[in-house]
Amino acid sequence: MPMNSRRSLGLLTKINLIIAAILLVFFALSAWLNYRQQREVTIAEAVEKARIAAFEAIRTREYISRELKEGGVELSRQRYGLIPVVASNRIGQLVAKDLGYRIHQVSDRYRNPQNAPDSFEAAVLKRFRDNPGRQEEYAVTAMEGEQVFRYLRAFDAEQSCLECHGDPEKAPAYIKEMFPEETDQAYHYQLGQVIGAASVTIPMYRLERQVARNLRQDLLYSGGIFLALITCLGLLTRVAVTRPLSALGKAIDEIVRTGRFEEKIDRRSRDEIGVLIDGFNEMIDHLGEKTRHLEESEQRFRLLTETARDAIVSFLPNGQIILFNRQAERIFGYSKREALGISVQELLGEDCAVHSGTDIETYLERQAGRLTREARTIACRRRDGGRLLLELSLSVAESEGHLFYTAILREKEKPADQ
């Protein structure tokens, strides 16, 4: 915003803009913190969902294995789909399709190429084996150019697993036929050994949508609170600050316009503005009293000058007349309105020294000292051109660093025989 525009704004507008800017900063900070919190909560929810999905995949495998064993179901090549690992993996894929996730079981000693781990899963499987107590791991990473959330939960070899993955000599005939020992890497597992993991992959855009949805709701709620706060603060500022100051400004304008010190303001509080208003009211009383004294003094001065028997003419160093009393009007024939503003040279006769080519300001600078020390007779002229001889007494005064002269002029008495 340009500097001139900022200066022309009202106080309430400036205060509201400052409050809005401060609250906007806090709102942005709150939104950023809220986003981080929502993301953490969403990731935590994703971990829980993935944990449940992985756990259920493992439980499905264990359940199928137990039911086959208790039911005495003999597996064969034709019943390959009922093998616990195969069945639970296929069930997981169906569930993942409904959820929009990717759920499958991986192993770095796989028989089905579909169960081969990618680089991330292979690294996690190695950490599971290196750290036997570690059962799960998750991270946000890139997969095929897309950000995804990945979760792996380890599962260990159980007794039912060893029937097909233990000693190859004890494996079912159809397993040995399908996966010869010479070419298969999934034999010779030990009980409790990590044989793979349930892997869950969730596209991050699904989680980000949830984050955005939650964040949008929170921002609308927070934005409403901030808006209400700005409104309340604006109203409070208007009532407590700008309205009293506006009343103070109007009172000052009224004083400047009328020149009368009668406008006072009611104090409504005892805060700093209340103290300011009290000070203003005291100043009004003080100035009013001084004004009354000044008016009385001016009235007395006016009465004194207007009733004086002598002509009184005050003028500036350049000769401009600033005071012309009633006796001066009578003697010179000028009205006060006509005399104020003209040069005092207009009142002097042509044979006066001022008319000898020297301007009056220079003349006064040179002769004022002598003129103020003694009275003297000077030649003057009336408005109609008539000549006068007047006795002059000149005084010099200073006001606010500026000089002005006052001439008291008295008519010369005529001789008794005239």
Image: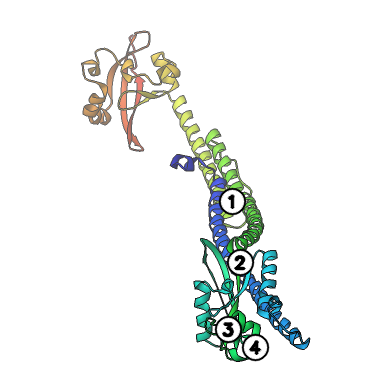
The residue positioned farthest toward the right in the image shown: 71
Q: Which residue is mark 3?
A: 195
Q: Calculate the distance from the C-alpha at mark 3 to the C-alpha at mark 1.
A: 75 Å
Q: Dividing the picture into quarters, in which one does residue 41 lie?
A: bottom right
Q: Calculate the distance from the C-alpha at mark 2 to the C-alpha at mark 3.
A: 23 Å
Q: Calculate the distance from the C-alpha at mark 1 to the C-alpha at mark 4.
A: 86 Å
Above or below: residue 189 compared with residue 246: below
Disc 4 or disc 2, which is closer to the eye? 4
* N-terminal label among 1 and 4: 4
Nearest the viewer among 264 and 360 is 264
Above or below: residue 123 compared with residue 173: above
Q: Which residue is mark 1?
A: 241
Q: Calculate the distance from the C-alpha at mark 1 to the C-alpha at mark 2.
A: 56 Å
* N-terminal label among 4 and 3: 4
Q: Residue at x 64, y 48 (%)?
A: 266
Q: Calculate the distance from the C-alpha at mark 4 to the C-alpha at mark 3.
A: 14 Å
Q: Residues within 10 Å of mark 2 (few under 14, many from 20)?
A: many
Q: Residues within 10 Å of mark 4 (few under 14, many from 20)?
A: some
The type of residue carrying mark 2 is Ile
